[in-house]
Amino acid sequence: MDINFQPLLDSWVFLLRAIGTTVLLSVLSMLVGFVVGVFVGALRTYGGRLVGALLAFYVDTMRAIPLLVVLVWMFFAFPILFGVRIDSMTAAVVALGLHLGAYVAEAIRAGLTSVRRGQMYAALALGMSRTQAIRTIILPQALIRMLPPLGSLFTIAIKDSAIASVIAVPELLRQSQTLAGQTFRPFEIYTSAMFVYFLLCYPVARGTDALYRRLSHLGSS
Amino acid sequence: MTHTPILAARDVRKRYGAVVALDGVSLDVERGEVVCLIGPSGSGKSTLLRCLNALETVDSGTVAFEGRDIRAKADDARLVRRRMGMVFQNFELFPHLSVLRNLTIGPTTVLRLDMAEAEQRARALLLRVGLIDKAMVHPSALSGGQQQRVAIARALAMEPALMLFDEPTSALDPETIGEVLAVMKGLADDGMTMVVVTHEMDFARRVADRVVVFDHGRIIEVGPPAQIFEAPHAARTRDFLSHLGWHGESIDIGIKEKT
Ligand SMILES: Nc1ncnc2c1ncn2[C@@H]1O[C@H](COP(=O)(O)OP(=O)(O)OP(=O)(O)O)[C@@H](O)[C@H]1O
Ligand SMILES: [Mg+2]
C-alpha cells in the first residue's frame, strides 16, 4: 500500500486551524449547553408548573429531533423565518448548544432531586433564600454527583461538532474532506482526523472521571 | 402587661393529605427556657418544629416569634429563620464545604458579614464545641457526634435567639451521644432558649424547664420534668414512658427520618 503523509504536513497550518475551529466549536457549544442545561434543569425542578411544562417541551423536542436536522434547520430555515442571516459557526454553536442543553438539563434535574430534602431545609433554616440555597448548597452537590454523565455528554459534544461540516463550518472533518479531495489521500487524512478526535475526547473522559473520583465524597450528603 | 413569650404557637393545624400531623397545637416558649418535646414516632414533633420556623406552612393557626407573625410565604419567614437555629437528626452538614465554611456560609451569605469576621466567629465556636482542629476537613471525615457538634456550631454562627433541635442524638452511636448532649447542656446553662425534640429522657429530666408530651398531633400534657416523669397525669404519658423504659435505647436507634 502506498502511504504518504506529505500532503498532510504540507497543509499543517490549514489543518491546525481546522482543529482550532473544532475545539472552539466544541467549547462554545459546551458552554451554551451547560448554562442552558443548568437553568432548564433547575427551573424544571424548582419552578412552577407552567414553566416546567414549557421546558419539558423544549427538552423533549430536542431529544426527539436528530441533531443533524436541528442544525440544518437552524442554518437554512431560521433565517427565513426570522429574516436574519446567521453565519454557519453561530448556527452550529446554537444548534449544538441547545441540543446538548436538553441532555445536560436532564442530568442536572436528576442530580438536584437526588440531594435529600434535609439539605434544603438546613440551608433555609440558616435564613438563605431558595435561590441562594440552590446555588450554594444543592447545585454544587448535584454537579459533583453528575460528573460522570456530564463527562460523557461533553465528549459527545466534541464528536458531534463534526456534524457542523454539513453547513460548511471549517472544522476538522470539513477541512479533511476538502484536503482529501485535493490530494487524493483520504486514508492518511481521515486516519489523522480520527486520531485527533480521539486525542480531544480522551482527556475529557479521563479528566472528568479523575475529577469525580477526587470529589465524589464531597457530593454525598 | 408587656410580657410576650419569645415564641408563641396558637392552635396550629397541619395536614398532609389525609394525615393530620398537627391537630391544634398551642405552645408558648419563654426567653431562656428549655422545652423538651417527647412523644411517639409520627406524633407530629418534627412537623411542629418546621412550622415554628416557617419551613412548613401551617393550614390554620398562628406562630409568632418575638411578637411577629410568621408566614412561610412572606419575606418575614427569612428574617425569622436567621434568628432561629435548627439542628437536624441527620446533621445536614453541607458535604461539599469544609467544616469552617459550613460555619461561615450562613453569616457571609445571609448576614453579609465579611469573611474575616465570619471566620473569627466560626473558630470561636469550633473551639467551644471542641473541634477547632477539624476546621479545614470536610464533614465526611468526622464521626456522627462530631458532625452534630459542627451542626450546632453552624446554627450558633448566626447568633440565634432560639435553637430548635429535632432528635439531635437519634442517629448517633451510643458512645457519641454524650458529647452532643454535653454541648447542648452547656448551651442551656448559658441561657439559650431551646426547643428540643428528644428521646433522651435523662437529658429532658435534667435540663428541661418544661416537658411537652405529644401524641397524634396534640399536646396531651405539659409540666416540669419532675411531674411528667414521676407523676404524669395522662394515661398515655404513662404508657409512652413505660414503653421507653422497657426498650430504652433500641427505640432511639430504630427511628428513621421520614423523607
Ligand atoms: N412532608 C410530609 N409529607 C407527608 N406526610 C408527612 C410529611 N411530614 C410528616 N408527615 C406525616 O405527618 C405525621 C407526623 O410526622 P412527624 O415527622 O412530624 O412526626 P414525629 O413526631 O417527628 O415522628 P418521629 O419521632 O418519627 O420523628 C406522620 O404521620 C408523617 O408521616
Ligand atoms: Mg421527627
Image (cartoon, rainbow, N blue to C red):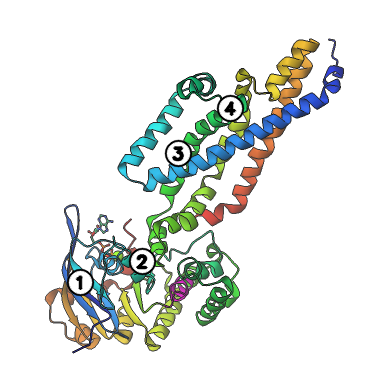
Instruction: Check the picture and name the quadrant holding the N terminus of chain B.
Output: bottom left
**Residues at discs 4 and 3 in contact (Cβ within 8 Å):** no
Q: Residue at x 22, y 62 (%)?
A: B58
Q: Chain of mark 1?
A: B
User: What residue is pinned by disc 1?
Assistant: B214
- Could you give the CA–CA distance between mark 4 and mark 3, rounded to whole angstroms? 22 Å
Q: Chain of mark 2?
A: B
**Residues at discs 4 and 1 in contact (Cβ within 8 Å):** no
Q: Which residues are magenta?
A: B149-159
Horizontal relation, residue B57 to residue B90: left or right: left
Type of amino acid under label 4: Ala
Type of amino acid under label 2: Arg
Q: Are marks 1 and 3 on the same chain?
A: no
Q: Chain of mark 3?
A: A
- Could you give the CA–CA distance between mark 1 and mark 3, rounded to whole angstroms? 43 Å
Q: Are marks 1 and 2 on the same chain?
A: yes
Asked if the magenta segment contains residue B157, the reply would be yes
Looking at the rendered image, the disc whose residue lies closer to the viewer, 1 or 3, is: 3
User: What residue is pinned by disc 2?
Assistant: B78
User: What residue is pinned by disc 3?
Assistant: A106
- Could you give the CA–CA distance between mark 4 and mark 2, rounded to whole angstroms? 44 Å
Q: Residue at x 82, y 20 (%)?
A: A8
Picture coordinates of residue B91, whole percent (x, y):
43, 66
Q: Residue at x 60, y 19 (%)?
A: A167
Q: Which quarter of the frame holds ligand 1? A: bottom left
Q: Chain of mark 4?
A: A
Q: Residues within 10 Å of mark 1 (few under 14, many from 20)?
A: many
User: What residue is pinned by disc 4?
Assistant: A92
Establish whether ligand 1 lies closer than 8 Å to the Cβ of label 1: yes
Dot 2 lies on which element?
helix
